[in-house]
Image (cartoon, rainbow, N blue to C red):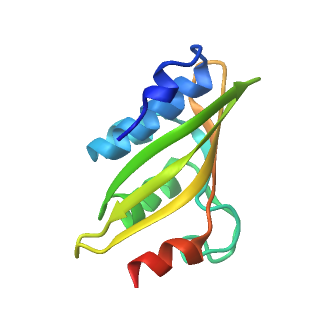
Amino acid sequence: MSHEIMKNRAPHPARAAAMRSIETVEAGDREGWLANFHPEAALEDPVGISPMDPEGKGHHGIDAIAAFWDNFIGPGNVRFHIRESFACGNECANVGTITTRSAEGAVGRCELVMVYKVDAEGKVLSLRAFWEVDEMMADFF
């Protein structure tokens, strides 16, 4: 886990939301992660068509985001290594690597960019993750 780059950058509401998201995922804290989102938030992880989103339209609203956790985040163990963090407006883009260990012990790693957009209260309105599914799947198989 490496969040030092984010902790050492200037405080920003979107960066704070990104930190909460990362920390709750790593802790396996489903309810804490969901509490970070606006009730009408959108999650695209990854952006576009993928096995996690066959229509490529994203997951909209807390119920859909909770189902995403239940199906893809909760069953495994996810770790983040953030190398860069750029905040402006009401958004923050983080560049890093995620490492995922499945319940069966398979490990996958991929490079990604995560873009968080927040509302005036710091709740995540959208989380868009850019990563290549084939790269992650190649590690698993």
Relative placement, left or right, of 36 versus 9 is left
Find residue 84 and report its horizontal and vertical position in percent.
Answer: 59, 36
Confirm whether residue 91 shows in the render. Answer: yes
Q: Which residue is drawn at the image coordinates 61% and 74% (left, top)?
A: 50
**In front of the other: 68 or 9:** 9
Locate residue 121: give its quadrant: top right
**Residue at the extreme bottom:** 141
**Residue in the picture at 39% in, 78% down:** 140
- Image: 79 above or below 36: below
Please identify the residue farthest to the top as the structure is shown. Answer: 10
Image quadrant in which you'd find residue 115: top right
Residue 118: image x %, image y %? Answer: 64, 29
Q: What residue is shown at x 37% (from left), y 36% (from top)?
A: 23
Residue 87 is situated, as x and y percent measured from the top left of the image, at 68, 26
Q: Is residue 127 above or below residue 55?
A: above
How many circles with numbers are drawn on the protein? 0
